[in-house]
Image (tube, helix red, strand yellow):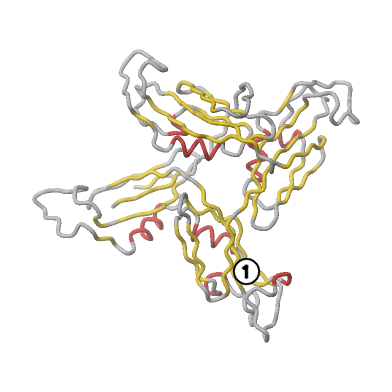
Amino acid sequence: MYIKGLLIMVVFLQTAASEEEPGDVFYELVCEDEDMHLKCPKGYTIEILFAMFGKKNYKICYQPGIQIENCEAKNASIIAQNKCNLRQQCYLSADTDLFGDPCGEDTHKYLDVAYRCLKNNNIVSFTICEHERFTIECPLANRIKIVNAFYGRKNGITCTNHNTGHDSLKCDSKTALEIVASNCDHSKKCSVTVNNELFGDPCIPETFKYFELDYLCIEGIRNISCEHETMSLSCERGYINILDAFFGKKENTRTYCSIWSEKVSNCEAWKTLDIMKYKCDFKRNCQVEADVRVFGDRCPETNKYLDVTYECVDAPTYSAIACEYDQLQISCPDGQFLWIVDALFGREHPTICYKPPRAVVNNVCRANIGFDVVESRFLFSVIYY
C-alpha cells in the first residue's frame, strides 16, 4: 500500500530582529533550536526564495560527535513560504517540530533562508484606539490576508485623547499578528474588538494603547455551475483550498441559471461550505455534482446553482510505503492531524516491494477503492496502525 499523507502544521513563535531594507536578497541562518525573525519595512511583504533545514556543511553549527552531512528536509521551502509569504514580518523556529528530522537527532542542524522584500501597493492600513472594534471585508471572490498587526504604543501622538499620564512609548504585543491572522486569514469579512483580553497587556499598567493593521484582499478562483451540472476544480500547482461555497438561489443573482417560468426564491442550502471542503480540500482535482442529492433542496421548483471560490495553496506532503501483508503506521505530532491526499494499492514500479522468486506479472495496476478505504480510516487521525 502506498500512502501520501498531508500534515497541517501550525507553529507560532516570537523573537526580535532588526528590520531589513527592500530591494536586495537577504540571507538568514540560525542553528537548530534557535529562532529566526524575518522582517520588511511597512508597505513591503516577504517573499521566501529558498529555505533549507538540515546539514550541508559540517562546519556550520558544529558540535562534537557524529555528524551526518548532506541531509535536508525536502519541504523546508514550502513550509517557510506558507508561514511567511505576504507577511511584513515572520518567525521561524529551526526545530524538528516544524521541519521534521532529516538527519537524525545526533546531528546538529541549521536553518538557512533567503528572502526579499517586495513593494505591495494593494496593502490597506488603518489605526484604531484601544477598546474600539474594527470590521474589514473584501470584495466577492477575494479573501483577507493579514500582512502585519501592532498592538501597544510606539509614540505619544496616536490616540492621545485617552491619555492617562502613565504611558509607555515603547511596548507592543508579540502575538498580535498571529492572533489577528488566525481570526481573519482566508475570511471574506472579519470583526475584532481591540483590548487586553484578546492581546494581553504589553505595556505598563494604565497605558492607553492603539492598534495598527495592514492587510490585503487576495483574489480567489470562482466557479459557478447550474443545478444538475458537474463542477470541476483543479490546481496545476499546489492543492485546492475551498474559501466559500453557496448552493441555492439569491435574489440579487436571479439571472444565474434561471428559466422563464420558475419560482424565484432567496434560499441557501445548509453546510454547503463544509460539504465542499470535505470533498475537495487538499486535492489537486475535484468534481462535485451541483445537485440536491448532495446539498439538499431548500427551494423546490427553483433552478439553483453552485457558486464556489477556492485557491491553490502549496502544502508539504509526506509518503509512506508498506508491502502487501505488512503493517503501515503513520502519525502526526500533538496538535496536528492527518489528511490523506492520495493512496494506491497495487503496483506502479517494478522494483518497489519486489520479492523474488515471486513473479511480477503486472507493473501497472491500481485498486479503484484504495483511496476511499484509506481516507475512511485515517482522516483526522493523529496516529493509526
Q: Which residue corresponds to the image point at 54% horizontal and 62% vertical from the top-left?
A: 275
In this view, 350 is above or below 72:
below
Q: Quadrant of residue 374?
A: bottom left
Q: Which residue corresponds to the image point at 59% horizontal and 34% vertical from the top-left?
A: 46
**Residue 71 image offset from top left, x and y in percent:** 34, 29
In-image side of 346 versus 148 (left or right) = left
Which one is nearer the viewer's eye here, 37 or 355? 37
Which one is nearer the viewer's eye here, 223 or 182? 223
Q: Quadrant of residue 247?
A: bottom right
Q: Residues within 10 Å of mark 1 (few under 14, many from 20)?
A: some
The residue furthest bottom is: 261
**Residue 226 image offset from top left, x and y in percent:** 58, 74
In this view, 384 is above or below 111:
below
Element class at badge 1? loop
Q: Which residue is mark 1?
A: 269
Q: Quadrant of residue 69?
A: top left
In-image side of 359 versus 117 (left or right) = left
Residue type at the position of mark 1 = Ala
The residue furthest left is: 357
Total marks placed: 1
The residue furthest front is: 23
Q: Which residue corresponds to the image point at 54% horizontal and 61% vertical from the top-left?
A: 276
**Residue 321 image offset from top left, x and y in percent:** 29, 47
In-image side of 136 versus 278 (left or right) = right
The residue furthest right is: 161
